[in-house]
Amino acid sequence: LVIYSNFPLPQHHRLLDDLRVQRGDVLAKLALPASDEPIHVYLFESEERFDEFLEEHHPEFPARRAFFVESDTRLAVYAQWGERVAEDLRHEVAHGYLHSVVRSIPLWLDEGLAEYFEVPRGQGGVNRPHVQLLLERLLKQGWRPNLARLEALDAAGDMTQDDYAESWAWAHWMLETDPARKQLLQQHLDVLRRQGNAEPLSSSLRRICPVPEQALVEHLVALGPRL
Ligand SMILES: [Zn+2]
């Protein structure tokens, strides 16, 4: 990580030290090879300076507190040093670590994994606000997961909060329930890394789990509050 800021930051800041450790966590969890490609992280002290910067350099971006930009030559993260900076940085830097090894990742999976890794260490990747949102949709609004639908999304601007939550749920279910699912996800990423594209997970998953949507719903219910 190469950190730039427009305000003084201590040499060792706990959050920044944790972010450095996160590279090993991300790559080990996904069984990806080590990478030492730098991730450039630009931190802005105030919202005004951040907005000014965005307006000047990325006027096409929607208003957000942080973002990740991949170009042909570098991986960079821009963020405001605000109340939610820890979560924002864990999310955006996770994109950086992932892209330092796998150049081309389906949008839903990229976001689902970033939502998984934005959770503080030691919480098993359980993104509580997402669990709550999806259970509410499930129980009161008849929502059902649909991986093939997520796989068809190709513009970040088209992803709703529900899509982020569902993407997280698939990532969490694959990584934390059954070693065979985790292995399938790891193999999927390995093929993407080597070939740039891969068979959609919605179809390869069915070989090891006939009705993954049902299994995902059961997983969410198990993560919810005890009734
Ligand atoms: Zn993201």
Image: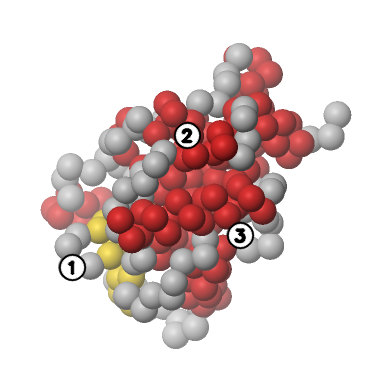
Residue marked by disc 1: 73
At label 3, the amino acid type is Pro
Residue marked by disc 3: 120
x 43%, y 55%: residue: 189
Give how far across and how far down residue 18 sits, in percent: 54, 72
Give how far across and how far down residue 53 sits, in percent: 20, 56
Location of the C terminus (image quadrant): top right
Location of the N terminus (image quadrant): bottom left
Instruction: Label 3, secondary structure: give it.
Output: loop
User: In front: mark 1 or mark 2?
Assistant: 2
At label 2, the amino acid type is Ser
Instruction: Label 1, secondary structure: give it.
Output: loop
- Residue 15 visible in the current orientation: no
Does the numbered disc 2 mark a residue whose Cβ is under 8 Å from ligand 1?
no
Which of the marked residues, 2 or 3, is nearer the chain's N terminus?
Answer: 3
Residue marked by disc 2: 203
Residue 60 position (above or below residue 213) = below
- Residue at the front extreme? 207
Q: Nearer the viewer, residue 127 or 145?
A: 145
At label 1, the amino acid type is Thr
Mark 1 and mark 3: Cα distance apart in space: 30 Å
Q: Is residue 184 left or right of residue 71?
A: right
Which of the marked residues, 1 or 3, is nearer the chain's N terminus?
Answer: 1
User: In front: mark 1 or mark 3?
Assistant: 1
Question: Within 10 Å of the Cα at label 1, are there few (<14), some (14-19), or many (20+) other Cα atoms?
Answer: few
- Residue 26 visible in the current orientation: yes
